[in-house]
Amino acid sequence: MQSQLPISESSVKKLATAMAALEYSDSKLFLQLISSNVNGDINARSLASFTPKRWRAMLTVLGHSFSRKQIDRAYAAITSGLDDENVGEFVLESPLDSNKLVVAFASNSGERLDGHFGSCIRLLIYHVSKDEKRLIEVKEIDSDAKGELRTQHLVSLINECDLVFALSIGGAAAAKITRAGIHPIKAKAPIDIHDKIAEVQSAIDKGVAPWLSQRLTA
């Protein structure tokens, strides 16, 4: 992929990965699409500014019928702070027997909280207690469902959870999550999941969030 526009090598790699996810080969038109939708240079910051809704609208200009999985994988490629191929395999641990919270994180790259609930490519499920944290399951999102059906599918994947963290959660989705007895929480920015878990554990330990302690299950 060649361009006369200011663009970093890492961004070129992200765009190439996004094109591969879309199975789209017209690099000139794809680059024109990206450049017309960023304010200034094409870099990690400008690519990360795309929202899932805007990304889906942008792709309609290409005149192709992409699957939801292709769209979400491509979105993860251009907005993620990490290269998914370099994060290594997930190491699952045995569940905690008691006194734990079951917490889901919307993720696109490794053990990072960097996904939007409706468009993340996987949900990482952890057992969290005051002193321990264990990754017990990785749920890859492999569905082309849209709208309410997609929300129902995603909620079904976390129906055993107490909390779900994501960069954003739409109002309708948040309502369905809440009705399912799960507490949705938006993160202000991408963050290492272990750092976010440490915040949860601190809140439990200090008693600053009594509702968290009340959700600890036996």
Image (tube, rainbow, N blue to C red):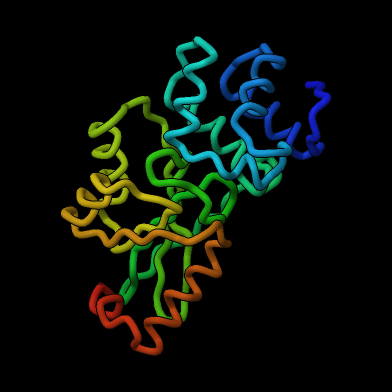
Q: Is residue 214 left or right of residue 47?
A: left
User: Which residue occupies the foreground of this view, 195 or 7?
Assistant: 7
Q: Is residue 65 above or below residue 44?
A: above
Instruction: Give the residue furthest to the left.
Output: 179
User: Which residue occupies the foreground of this view, 25 or 92?
Assistant: 25
Residue visible at 69% across and 34% down?
14
Q: Is residue 42 left or right of residue 203?
A: right
Expressed as whole percent of the image width and height from the top left, the position of residue 76 reads 56, 38
Q: Is residue 147 left or right of residue 192?
A: left
Residue visible at 71% across and 45% down?
86
Q: Is residue 133 above or below residue 119?
A: below
Expressed as whole percent of the image width and height from the top left, the position of residue 191 reads 56, 61
User: Which residue occupies the foreground of this view, 26 or 72?
Assistant: 26
Residue visible at 63% across and 22% down?
19
Q: Is residue 114 above or below residue 197?
A: above
Instruction: Give the residue furthest to the front.
Output: 39
Expressed as whole percent of the image width and height from the top left, the position of residue 89 reads 62, 47
| Occupied quadrant, residue 42 | top right
Residue visible at 32% across and 27% down?
145
